[in-house]
Image: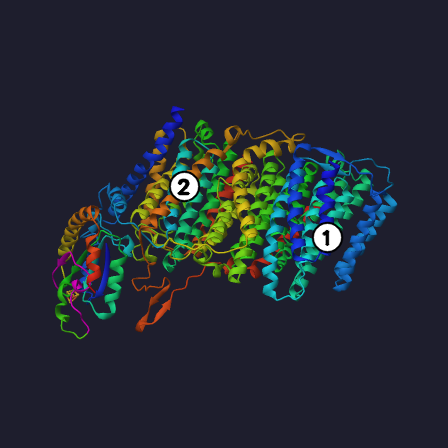
Amino acid sequence: MRETLLAIFIGLFATPLLGGLINGLDRIITARLQGRIGPPVWQPFYDVIKLLSKEKMVVNVWQAFCAYAYLSAAAISVVLFFLKSDLLLILFIQAVGAVFVVIGALSSTSPFSQVGAHRELLQILSYEPLLILVVAGIYLEIGSFKIDDIYAWGQPLIFKLPFLFIALGYALTIKLRKSPFDLSTSHHGHQEIVKGVLTDYSGPFLALIEIGHWYDIILILGLCSLFWATGWIGMIILVAITYFIEILIDNVTARMTWRWMIGYVWAMGLTLSIVNLIWINLA
Amino acid sequence: MAELSFLLVVFPMLAACSCFLMRHNTIYSLIVIISGGLLIGSAILLIPLVPFSFSPKSFLGINIHEILTAADFLLLFIILYFGVKYKNWLINSLAIFQIVLLGYLEFFLINGSETYPIIYCDNLSLIMVLIICVVGSIICVQALPYMKKHETHLKIGVSRQPHFFFVMILFLGAMNGVVLSNDMILFYFFFELTTVCSFLLIGHDKTERATKNAVRALWMNSLGGAAFITALVFIYTRLGTLDMQYIIHADSKSQLVILSMALLCFAAFTKSAQFPFQSWLLGAMIAPTPVSALLHSSTMVKVGVYLALRLAPAIEGLFLTQCVTIFGAFTFLFAAALAVGQSNGKKVLAYSTISNLGLIFACVGLNTPESIAAAIILIIFHAVSKALLFLCVGTIEQHIESRNIEDMRGLYTKMPLTALISVMGVITMIMPPFGLLLGKWMAMEAASSFLCGIVMIAMGSALTVMYWARWAGILMSDPFAGKFKLEKQPVLTWAALFSLCIGVGVLSLLSPWIYRWCIIPIMGSDYLASYSTDYGIFENAFGVFAVLPLSLVAVAGFIIAILAVKSATHSRITMPYLSGLQTEEPRVFKGPMNRLITAEAGNYYLSSIFGEDKLTPWINLGAVILLTLVIGGAL
Amino acid sequence: MLHFDCGSCNGCDIETLACLTPVYDIERFGVINVGNPMHADILLVTGTVNPRNKKVLVNLYDQMPNPKVVVAIGSCGLSGGIFKDAYNVLGGIDKVIPVDVYVPGCPAKPEAIIDGVVMALKKYEVIKKKHSDSVPSRMKWRKIAP
Ligand code: SF4
């Protein structure tokens, strides 16, 4: 019981802190890669606190609903992750959040927001199958969907599922809203479709979505960490390396079109996953 | 038992006839409502009785078998009559083929000495009966106000509603007959009866297109009927009985029996409008919306999956079962892809039905305890959610006179309550903790060890999310200040919409218990119960789905979000961002020379990839190949 | 921060954008350039106001959620600058919306702009306090002005 409560506590409160911190580090590293100094580490927190203190302003009142729904779905999925629940279930709940972001964006008539919403849908379309296949691959390897059993498994999964890890990398890039897949909204797409799905969110509601995004980051990085679930050090190193590569990719690539994204992600990602799945099936 | 079965099967037929005869508006409305209530009541009374089986020896003094034979032939001749009337040689030849085979079976093969129950009802039948009676009756009741409006709109002089409700109620009776019959000949009779009913309903409006589509539905389903009767002949020659329970559990897996199983699966595919037979269900859209609702949710297409579910134990371990999985997953994926390319709301619903049925077939094919449970859960929740969505679309369509999704933009400002219920319907389709997703979760976990299946299911489910989310979003798409005026609808419409909406929520909440009390007994003899459902949490060795806790959390989240909406109504409302050029009108901006320009944004339908005309030929080709695999693999 | 080019000769714009480059790196102060007033706290305006872009400026200003500050850049933004007497020029930014910080220069130097933005950030804090204390006083002003 105490463990459960602890897990819920960590999931709810520690995760956004960690997510914000990672976001801050991300901004600094990105700045350094571009020869700049970059903001303070705590900048994301300053931003969110500032947004929360701003005036409430909406285009459609259901935006508020969608922002809260996204935040709660993201939080629940992370809590379930810390409760070591079913991976597939976690993915489903994570998808709920993503869908509410889309619905929220569609609820405004601004063309920017509409285009952003559709791009977001295409992004979901691209990464969702990969995530499911990754989970299916884990199941094929260890015979369970429960995170419990993954921790109990003796050896790091990455040796058995290297291609699936790369496929997960695609999903990660999309989820983190990083180039070349930051179509629907991005962290530094200044004038690019004026921030897509987030166009008509402002003030506190924007802050909620940002916090939800932090939860999302942690969830998907957590998914990566499962590939080295045998020890803390391995886990952290794996996640750190992956994240650094993500930042690097973000900085050296340009934003591509959705056509390219779907074609590329499905062709590469699915091939990689299928090859890996066949491999474990045979082994 | 006998009385209840009579109430469920024969009574609707009588009620239907009286509907037809009493042409007065109030009288047949009353008959519809009362028989709906009676059906629901007797279905509920059936619950404590299952499982049971019996065979009525005679009806009104005539041997039941003789009545049956006569009815069978009568039905086939009716089909033949329609074939001649519409000059369709395909229907004619199929009908004649069936008449010949039936004659051969009845007069040369069967010697009439068998003693096996004609009616058999276990939990699976019970679940089906409940779905048919409850959802079907709700749809019939909603059809009352709908048809009134429909006829005023079409300016039809002499009302054809008695005819309409005659077929609708007859249909419910036929469906109950299908799921309760154990004698394959009886099953075949009702199977054909549903075909005829759907033919009549699709062609109800008597327009040229309606007739054309109805005829197409007739020949496609006759194809299924022909496969069915062929299978019966094969089975009888090999096993010497038409007792369904015996056939399913028969040990002898001779070539001929396997072939007939494949033919029965084929019949199931035609009934459930799987590729390449999807066109009859799409054509059925031409009919008034309650018909679509009935065909898609509780009747007709469910016959196919029911038949497949019945056969599941018989095909276990065969190559056939894998074929069914691949075929189902294939349909799931590509029907979803086609749905993405659609802007016609009813077509999206149709493709989503086909796709969901594909998933159910895939589950049946996987043939594990989890997947069978998944199939049943999917059947239940698909029926309720789909009925809800169809009724919503019907209501919307009558209001805005369009079924195009683009025209439903910002529907919330025009008909807030209907729009919200539709969004709710969509949410029950794609989000946990609602039942449909529970089923999908079980299906995915069961399919994970089946490589080909899981890849297609994974892609298909992403596509599914895409077309649903898009639709839900568009309904809400209008800047909105918080105060709204409720639209006016007939009481019966509201009653139907609300009961379905609440029903799906309550059923989802109860799903662990439905599983424990209804679904486990079905599999009892063949399978071990695989999920434990303590505290409302589905759990087995490798997965958990916490229905009850998640529902509670979801309800809490929902309340918080609604409160947020309430408080947001007091906040500043601004216009959508249009690069600073916005005007007082939400979509209009000031262009060059101060002209007012309306900003347009359309959905991505990706018709270059998912267009119907582009994909359909290839999909049909693929489906034909797979079907050949299904039949050929059995040889 | 939202940068809006009202009707500048582009001189000030180039200097403003220079602030984002590695040389000046305005993100050191946590400031990033956004493309949408709904996400912005600071409105940075360069150039003169004319009848045509006046409405746009007001619209953008309106769509920024409170509290917010406005920085006018360059002589043009301050008063109309060398274009002051042109037939279509109404004058400086403050003819249309309230301005909090004025950054002079023709063009304004990036250092000056950064200085102005940082000042604006300080002013933002003050306004935020006022905003949370009472009704948005600046909204009242809006009603009288144009
Ligand atoms: S102040 Fe000078 S540099 Fe700036 S916009 Fe005006 S004329 Fe151009």
| Camera-side residue of B172 and A10 | B172
Q: Where residue C97 appears, x then y in whole percent? A: 19, 61
Residue beneath label 1, please? Answer: B18
Q: Quadrant of ligand 1?
A: bottom left
- Span highlighted in magenta in the image: C88-106
Residue B454, percent from left and from top: 55, 42
Q: What amino acid type should be assigned to the residue bearing mark 1?
A: Ser
Q: Which residue is depicted at the point 47% across and 32% down?
A: A146
- Which residue position holds label 2? B559
**Can you say which quadrant of the picture contains the N terminus of chain B?**
top right
Residue drawn at the location 38% of the way across and 31% of the way down: A8
Is B344 on the left or on the right of B36, as rendered? left
Q: Chain of mark 2?
A: B
The outermost residue toward the bottom is C87
Q: Could you say where residue B628 lies in the image, as x and y percent from the top left?
A: 68, 50
Displayed quadrant of residue A43: top left
What subunit carries mark 1?
A: B
Type of residue at label 2? Ile
Q: Is A56 placed above or below B4 here?
A: below
- Secondary structure beneath disc 2? helix
Residue B227: tell me if it is visible: yes
| Camera-side mark, 2 or 1 | 1
Q: Position of residue A34 (x, y in %)?
A: 25, 49
Q: Main secondary structure of the magenta part?
A: loop
Number of marks in picture = 2
Q: Is residue A70 visible?
A: no
Residue at left offset 22%, top offset 56%: C139
* Residue B45 within the magenta-colored segment of the rendering: no
